[in-house]
Image (cartoon, rainbow, N blue to C red):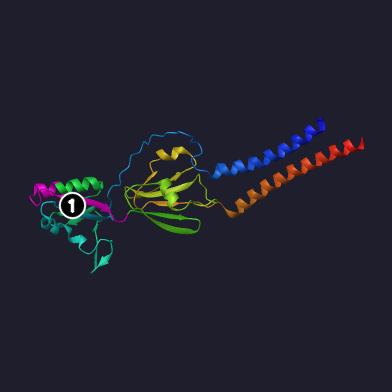
Amino acid sequence: MVKLRTIKTMIFAALIAVAATSCITSRRANYLQDMTQGSQIELENKFEAKIAPYDELSIIVTSPSDKKLAEPFNIANLAGTNNVYANGQRNGYLVDVNGNIDFPILGTLHVEGMTRLQLQETISNMLITKGHIHDPYVMVRFNNFKVFFLGNGTGRVLNIQNERCTFLEALAMLNDVGIYTRRDHIGVMREVNGKMVMRYLDPRSSDVFNDPFFMLQQNDFIIAETVNAGTARSEFAYWTGLIGTVVSVTSLITSIILYKSISK
């Protein structure tokens, strides 16, 4: 009976070794591992995309009472509605290096640092105060909210349909970043005050929600670092060898116990 219990113990030890390797793989790959059922995390960093140089904006002005009054303010939109080149003109307003756009009739507007809602309100107020339209409706949209991905030997451009995209949403759009990516070391690079700044995020932890780079901005780069293939193979060989050793030792002990039992 004691011998049978010993055999069971050896087998159980081998199973634990196998399970341990599985747990290690999960800890390296699974997202948000510290979140449980009902977890709630208050976001510290609220986000609204702000207009920056080289952004391209779609600005539409309408007037419920007199549509003809609004026509002169929509010259840039006459080329079409799909942000394409037509007759040499691009549909939208390109923000220049100084953060300005040239808007029909109203002239040069400094828009850098504004959210789209702030620009809508600014243009609407100018149209009213200058006596152009007494009931304007202004709609501003980003035409070029893009996020770039570099990693795993490839590059991709993610076209964001609105002005809000989180780090996790971008990873979902990428269909994950691959099992051989260092998930504790995924970089987000962006231009801040004329300098390129890199931060490394770890989507395996809920701390990622309150990283200042969690909310992506237009023209951010997501840079994934691929685990060295040799390292991955060495690690796999290590754990495979360890499991093989445990199983071999277990088999040897079992054989010895059975042999002694038969000899008696």
Image location (x, y in percent) of residue 255: 83, 41
Does the segment drawn in magenta span residue 73?
no
| Residue named by callout 1 | 109
Q: Quadrant of the C terminus?
A: top right
Q: Which of the two residues, 24 or 55, is positioned nearer the viewer here?
A: 24
Q: Residue at x 74, y 38 (%)?
A: 11
Q: Which of the two residues, 4 or 163, is positioned nearer the viewer here?
A: 4
**Badge 1 element:** strand
Q: Is residue 160 left or right of residue 234?
A: left
Q: Residue at x 71, y 37 (%)?
A: 13
The amino acid beneath tag 1 is: Leu
Q: Is residue 5 above or below residue 245?
A: above
Q: Which of the two residues, 192 or 88, is positioned nearer the viewer here?
A: 88
Image location (x, y in percent) of residue 244: 73, 46
First to last magenta residue range:
125-144
Q: Residue at x 78, y 32 (%)?
A: 5
Q: Residue furthest top?
A: 2
Q: Which of the two residues, 192 or 177, is positioned nearer the viewer here?
A: 177
Image location (x, y in percent) of residue 84: 28, 64
Residue 95 seen in this snapshot: no
Q: Is residue 247 left or right of residue 57?
A: right
